[in-house]
Amino acid sequence: MSERMILVLDEGTTSTRAMLYTADGVRGAMAQRELSQYYPRPGWVEHDAAEIWERTLACAREMVAHVGGADRIAAIGIANQRETVVAWDRRTGAPLSRAIVWQDRRTADRCEALSAEGHEALIQSRTGLVIDPYFSATKMRWLVDHVPSVAAAGDALALGTIESWLVWKLTGGLHITDASNASRTQLMTLDGAGWDDELCALFGVPRAALPAIVDNAAMLGTTVPDLLGGAIPITGLAGDQQAATIGQGCLSPGTVKATLGTGAFILASTGPALPVSAHRLLGTVLCQIDGVRHYALEGSIFVAGSLIQWLRDRLGLIAAAADTDAIARSVPDNGGVVLLPALSGLGAPYWQPGVTGSIHGLTHGTGRAHIVRAALESIAHQVHDLAAAFAADGAPWHRLRIDGGMSANDWIAQDMADILGLPVERPADIETTARGAAMLAAVGAGLFPTLESAMAGGSGGAAFEPVLSGVARDRRIAAWQAVLADAIRADGGRGGAALDRP
Ligand code: ADP
């Protein structure tokens, strides 16, 4: 009889997946379903929480059947898209509205008002987060203010992020959130055990509707037996970027990972030390085990892989994302072209929502390959600017571990090593989010005493060492900086903190 497996539920923005792992982190079978995306108005992004639940359950059932029954599963771990908010009725377990997704900007006015009222310093010092519609608190308040059934639910109202919603459904009414997800709401102080009364009052979120904040790895609950054919313990929960950081083994202070997907999310562990940023990076909980927290500094780049999709779907310059590697190699350099990828403003460390994208340096000699190459180069430049902000915050990088769909591109990985002047490492299995959730679940189920011991020896992988000459590197960086500074100036922007580097 083979060993029992860990079932990971990986709740992304575009799809939900169920995956099987051995206790020591080797990936097996997977089931996946797409999720419907609703864009009812410009800037609004919604999900159907009932659909998320039904499709997650279908994927989970497929994997339980695949492995031969619920008694073959030792534990469940969940990693989820963060910040997305669900409101449901405790009596019926039914959603009271569509879920408001992390990308949704509908609360921009409320955020502007909070800034104008002078609340940013308090919010940043307590939560580690800047004021932005990205986070959960203003979304929760919006539901209370604008959805009559949410306002009328009274004591029956439950509010939570996606892991809370799934745990409620899986367990038949347990209302919990883990500390990593709670740290994205703006309602918990970074080192506080529970919700912060003052923050709940400031954002107008009913505290009674919120879940209990629990560890990322522990015996958290058990599934209703009927759902999966047996009661399975849920022993790991984490936000997807935290899970990827754990899956990359970035636990000790100073280790850093970049997940290059639709956007790019970079987290550097600060260990037990509270992260503090003077350069508009975010402070976040990496994980909490036995009540002890580890933290991370985070930088979010809004446009990474979506730039490649734009080249393909809007410009028609490429047929497939993977073609960009060979196209970039087909020319010796960018031919003087610089591409600013500000397709939805600029995120960290610039925080310039009004800046738009542009392509510079066009001549008769410019070809498709130069533009594609300049697009790929913009990824390394954005990451390099974040590296400067992390260094300025006292968290310099020594090497960078990458994952996510875009990390499969060797040319990008090499260019990142060249521009950062640092080794870039890519694991053989780039599904680090699910792997992190599996590790947390294994620890929570008592199969390993610590996360460090749950970390399987990374097999294979690739390493990229910097080889570009200093002169060529400096020229690239100077050209990028000039275009960036011009765009921010033209927008009348304040200038990102990272631009003030020495
Ligand atoms: P997400 O989890 O955000 O949905 P993924 O990690 O699956 O994203 O990565 C998908 C993104 O990576 C897409 O935007 C795609 O354009 C980009 N991508 C995938 N493969 C490559 C490649 N070989 N080169 C460049 N970009 C790629």
Image (cartoon, helix red, strand yellow):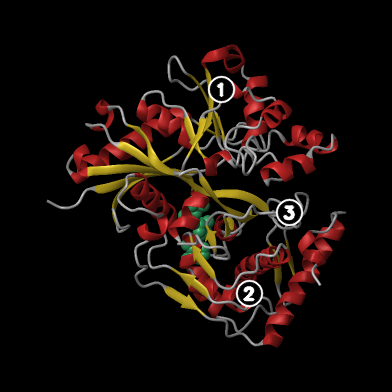
Q: Position of residue 157 (x, y in %)?
A: 54, 18
Quickly name the residue at label 3.
280
Q: Earlier in the sequence, mark 3 or mark 1?
A: 1
Left or right relative to 496: residue 239:
left
* Element on which disc 2 rests: helix
Task: Kindly identify the amino acid type of the residue bearing the numbered disc 3.
Answer: Arg
Residues 390 and 272: in front is: 272
Work out which quarter of the rendered image holds the C terminus and state it: bottom right
Residues 280 and 193: in front is: 193
Mark 2 neighbour density, 10 Å: few (under 14) some (14–19) many (20 or more) = many
Check whether the beta carbons of the residues at disc 2 and disc 1 lie within 8 A of each other.
Answer: no
- From mark 3 to mark 2, how far is it between C-alphas? 20 Å
Q: Earlier in the sequence, mark 3 or mark 2?
A: 3
Residue at the spot 52% in from the left edge and 28% down from the top edge: 211
**Above/below status of 84 relative to 318:** above
Task: Kindly identify the amino acid type of the residue bearing the numbered disc 1.
Answer: Ala
Residue at the spot 65% in from the left edge and 65% down from the top edge: 395
Q: Position of residue 199 (x, y in %)?
A: 70, 32
* Element on which disc 1 rests: helix
Residue at the spot 65% in from the left edge and 88% down from the top edge: 469
Residues 237 and 34: in front is: 237
Quickly name the residue at label 2.
420
Give residue 197's quadrant in the image.
Answer: top right
